[in-house]
Image (cartoon, rainbow, N blue to C red):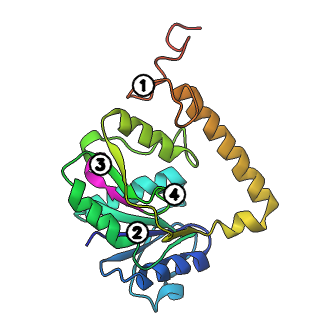
Amino acid sequence: MPNFYVLCGTDPNLGRTAIESVLASGYSGKLYLMNNMDSDVSLLFSDLPIEIVDAPVKLTMAQTANWIVKLAIKQGQDRIFTLPDDAIIKPGAIEPLLEKYEEIKNEKWLNIGYPSSSAFFTLANLNAYEEEQVWWDTFLFPMYWCDYHWLRIMRLRGWQDMFVEERNLVEHLGSENIKRHPGMRMRNYMIFEFNKATYEKIWGGEAGHETITDITAGGLENEGINNGD
């Protein structure tokens, strides 16, 4: 059974809800809480059969993704389940992904998930990272659109997302901090829009309508980039 990594970013209550949903699903493998908060949360989760791994420093979204993948590779994993703390899974969510893996394991697959929720709950292929040595860009996309950017590069290199039949087995609850604090909502909106504009500049269009196919993501096909204009 692949390891399961749940990210706890800012709200331990959300982290606990996510962890409890994994346990309730019948998951029987090794379950990790990846603590990206500035405090020790061990006492808050001491009653749960999990292992807590503390981030070395507060990490951005892209840094967190790379941290989890590199740790899992060191642990000998070739595929892992991931879930953010603001999402939950329901009983029956895991098995279809494992069945799909057995069907396509010899293909160049990136992630296996449900069509409407693969951004939250996925079975990720770590061999793709190792083979291509392509990681989430922590400089251009520290927060939003880092996943789209990584996926675009990998798809251009022949890797594919895989999906199972849509079911209502994953729920995105959303960040409580963003819901409660207008200032944080505004900050996140600005970061989202800035990262979106960066993505569109690099790839020559919005997600799904890109016109640039440079697999190095250097924007080499953009007019004026390399001629000093």
Q: Establish if 61 lies above or below 30.
A: above
Quadrant of the image containing the C terminus: top right
* Residue 100 sits in quarter: bottom left
| Point 57% across, 74% down: residue | 39
Residue type beneath disc 1: Thr
Residue 2 among magenta residues: no
Residue with the mark numbered 1: 213
Residue with the mark numbered 4: 116
Who comes first in sequence, dot 1 or dot 3? 3
Question: Helix or strand or loop: what does disc 1 sit on?
Answer: loop
Image location (x, y in percent) of residue 33: 44, 74
Who comes first in sequence, dot 4 or dot 2? 2
Question: Which tag is nearer the camera, tag 4 or tag 2?
Answer: 4
| Point 53% across, 54% down: residue | 61
**Disc 1 crowd, CA 10 A, few/some/many (<14, 14-19, 20+):** some
Left or right: 41 as drawn, with respect to 124: right
Q: Report the front residue among 25 and 192.
A: 25
Q: Establish if 205 lies above or below 102.
A: above
Q: Can residue 37 be seen in this view?
A: no
Residue 123 among magenta residues: yes
Who comes first in sequence, dot 3 or dot 4? 3
Q: Give the range drawn in magenta.
A: 122-129
Q: Report the front residue among 49 and 27.
A: 27
Question: Helix or strand or loop: what does disc 3 sit on?
Answer: strand
Image location (x, y in percent) of residue 35: 49, 70
Quadrant of the image containing the N terminus: bottom left
Who comes first in sequence, dot 1 or dot 2? 2
Residue with the mark numbered 3: 109
Image location (x, y in percent) of residue 171: 55, 69
